[in-house]
Amino acid sequence: MRGWGPRAAGRRRRLRFDGWIAGLGTASGTRLVVGHWPRSPFGPFSDVMAEHPDGQRVLLAPTRETADFIRRTYSFDAVRVVPVAVRHAGRTWTVTAGPLDLRFTTGRRGPLGLLLRAVPGPLASRPLWSALTDRPARLLMPGVRTRGTAGRGRREWYGARDLHPVVGVTATWQGADLGGLAPVSPPVRFGFGSAPRAPSLTRITTTVEVGAGEEDRAG
């Protein structure tokens, strides 16, 4: 789709992913980050990043292609290619991904969500805007970054466009109950920044800048 494939940036390319990121913790200590991308260079797909209480970081991705791209951008101890399905009806989201069965509910957006909604989408999705909002984001939500250096020298920008709190969750991993909703604490360690400490669902445009010589078959 035009505008969503590789973009030239000197000798580098910029890839854009538009969708949602849910970050939440559970009483068991497992923290989950779900990405749901209706528009991406790989077409529509979803993925899950999990960090367990012992620190093991696991990626669940639907194809080898998406798994390879994500693991080159973030850090994991294990990568599994499994079917990943994300569905939502109203404020309820359901995620099935290999060992994970997850269901969470969102609440009404608060002041920050209203503020993000007021920013025009074309502006919020620009890397320059993400660079300008990085310091305020760190002050408002410790651990959160809107720009940084990812794996293999890649650069990345997060442009948030809406925010809802997550108010309820049921989750199992390989059939074991992960417990009730909890903060994302300690912070997850997949990349240069964590998800917000308060469980949340963020409407977002992510831009990843990769080297022009990389063999990522996107778009």
Image (tube, grey):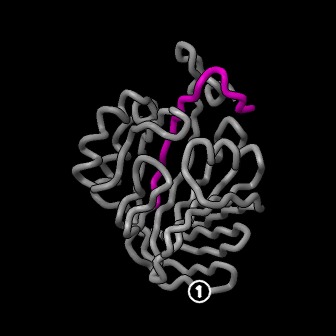
Task: Answer with the quarter of the image where residue 78 lies.
Answer: bottom right
- The foreground one among 123 and 40 is 40
**Residue drawn 66% across the image and 54% down it:** 46
User: Quarter holding the C terminus?
Assistant: top right
Q: Which residue is mark 1?
A: 177
Say whether residue 207 is magenta: yes
Say whether residue 184 is magenta: no
The segment highlighted magenta reads 201-219
Q: Position of residue 52 (x, y in %)?
A: 53, 72
Task: Answer with the quarter of the image where residue 80 lies.
Answer: bottom right
**Residue drawn 57% across the image and 42% down it:** 73
**Residue drawn 47% across the image and 36% down it:** 156
Horizontal side of residue 51 vs 184, given as left or right:
right
Q: Position of residue 83 (x, y in %)?
A: 77, 61
**Does 22 appear above or below 12?**
below
Outermost residue on the top side: it is: 10
Horizontal side of residue 18 vs 194, given as left or right:
right
**Does 72 appear above or below 167?**
above
User: Quarter holding the N terminus?
Assistant: top right
**Residue drawn 41% across the image and 55% down it:** 194
